[in-house]
Image (tube, helix red, strand yellow):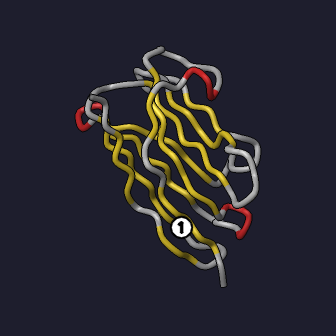
Amino acid sequence: QVKLVESGGGTVQPGGSLRLACAASERYAMAWYRQAPNKEREFVASITWRGGNKYHSNSVRGRFTISRDSAKNTVYLQMNNLKPEDTGIYYCAASNLNAPTGINQYDYWGQGIQVTVSS
């Protein structure tokens, strides 16, 4: 059974940084999504199976960076210059495809981890 375990969330002041990690049982193309209260789940960033291609949403580009350590089957999301609007539950997702293009192409999801940006 595929298992995704997220870590690294918490509360931080605006302008601060956090690094999320998602450990998988195997190697997959992976992504981070987030969901704020009363809003739909939205794409944050993704990385292909080999790690050669990375994608970031317009709202986080330049502040967040997705990366992976293939030896550890772990994907990271470095989040810098955090803003209150980044608050939400962050979900790690994994796909059996090499380069998934949408939320419906992710097969496995983590339990989610809270990120709160507040002064």
- Residue type for callout 1: Ser
Tell me the quadrant of the picture where the C terminus can be found: bottom right
Q: Position of residue 105 (x, y in %)?
A: 57, 20
Q: Is residue 76 above or below residue 24?
A: below
From the viewer's perspective, tell me whether residue 90 is left or right of residue 59.
left
Residue at 52% from the left image edge and 26% from the top image edge? 106
**Label total for image:** 1
From the viewer's perspective, tell me whether residue 114 is left or right of residue 69.
right
Q: Is residue 119 above or below residue 113?
A: below
Other-residue count near label 1 (Cα within 10 Å), few / some / many at <14 / 14–19 / ≥20: some
Q: Position of residue 37 (x, y in %)?
A: 70, 61
Farthest bottom residue?
A: 119
User: Which of the 4 quarters of the picture holds residue 15?
Assistant: bottom right
Residue at 47% from the left image edge and 42% from the top image edge? 92
In this orientation, which residue lies closer to the viewer: 12 or 53? 12
Q: Position of residue 107 (x, y in %)?
A: 47, 25
Q: Position of residue 114 (x, y in %)?
A: 52, 63
Residue at 31% from the left image edge and 37% from the top image edge? 3
Residue at 43% from the left image edge and 17% from the top image edge? 96
In this orientation, which residue lies closer to the viewer: 26 or 19? 26
Farthest top residue?
A: 97
Task: Say what secondary structure mark 1 lies in.
Answer: loop
Tell me the quadrant of the picture where the N terminus can be found: top left
In the rendered image, which residue does mark 1 sit on?
17
User: Which of the 4 quarters of the picture holds residue 102?
Assistant: top right
